Amino acid sequence: QTKESFPNEISKTDEERIQNCPERPSLAEKWIMTEKVDGQSGTYLLRKHKWLFGTKYEFVVCSRNFKTNDKNTSYWKCAEKFNIEKVLKNLIGNHKWICLQGECLGPGIQGNKYKLPCYTLRAFNLITPEGRMDSVTAENLVKPHGIFWVPMLGEISGDQLMKLGVDGILRAADGLSKLNSDTKREGIVFRSSDGKKSFKAVSPEFLIKFDE
């Protein structure tokens, strides 16, 4: 398999750690918290091409860093299982492209910490040329099409986060996973209510347990 470059419409998935951006919580009034899950980050992009006889669609599947055409990967298995190409066709509307990003989980992925019997996907980003949607809007759009979002953990104000400080936010990241209550969660991703700003707090307990 030759590795093709990542689509230039979108950025690769990686959130800034709170330790590197301690002032970021002050940049939004309200933050939506979701569980950070430990799997393989997949990117699914649908492009619309106008041509003589109407509209053609191009479906692109990527690992964290490269486009992949290998149908045996977890990325493609999830794409097929959840009909992601069809879902994105339903959601693209008048946009030139739409992108779903999520975490592929299951057997053989990161030690399958959640003890899942088969491959599954937990989405965390829905993006169009207008930008990244907020988590609540995005989940409401994909859920009726059978796509699961990463577990929602509630809301918190920027003021509360600034009072907690970096150490307090890291302590709050400790906890049990919503995907399997016998497993420690990897952490929490905080996203502003407009979807534009974000950061992550990785659980110190998780790092110690899994020696990461």
Image (cartoon, helix red, strand yellow):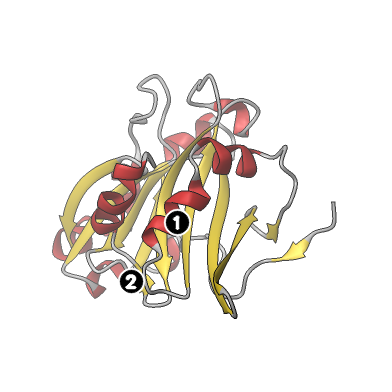
Q: Nearer the viewer, residue 197 or 59?
A: 59
Secondary element at image label 1? helix
Vertical position of residue 87 compared to residue 182: above or below: below
- Tell me the kind of residue under disc 1: Leu
**Position of 126 relative to 108 (above/below):** below
Depth check: give the residue in front, 11 or 173.
11
Vertical order, 174 against 125 (above or below) = above
Seen at 22% across and 71% down, the residue is 28
Q: Is residue 183 visible?
A: yes
Q: Nearer the viewer, mark 2 or mark 1?
A: 1
What's the amino acid at mark 2?
A: Lys
User: Is 189 left or right of 107, judged from the image as shown?
Assistant: left
| Number of residues whose C-alpha sits closer than 10 Å to that of mark 1, classed few (under 14), some (14–19) or many (20 or more) | many
Distance (Cα) linking label 2 and label 1:
21 Å
Q: Nearer the viewer, residue 187 or 60?
A: 60
Q: Position of residue 44 (x, y in %)?
A: 54, 56
Quarter of the view holding residue 157: bottom left
**Element under disc 2:** loop
In x, y percent, where is residue 39?
Answer: 55, 40
Quadrant of the rendering where the C terminus is positioned: top right
- Near-viewer residue (67 or 158): 67
Farthest front residue in view = 53
Q: Tell me the residue that label 2 is attached to.
A: 196
Q: Is residue 165 left or right of residue 42?
A: left
From the top left corner, tell me how far across and down residue 166 is, in percent.
32, 57
Tell me if mark 2 has few (under 14), some (14-19) or many (20+) residues whose alpha carbon lies within 10 angstroms of its own: few
The residue that disc 1 covers is 88
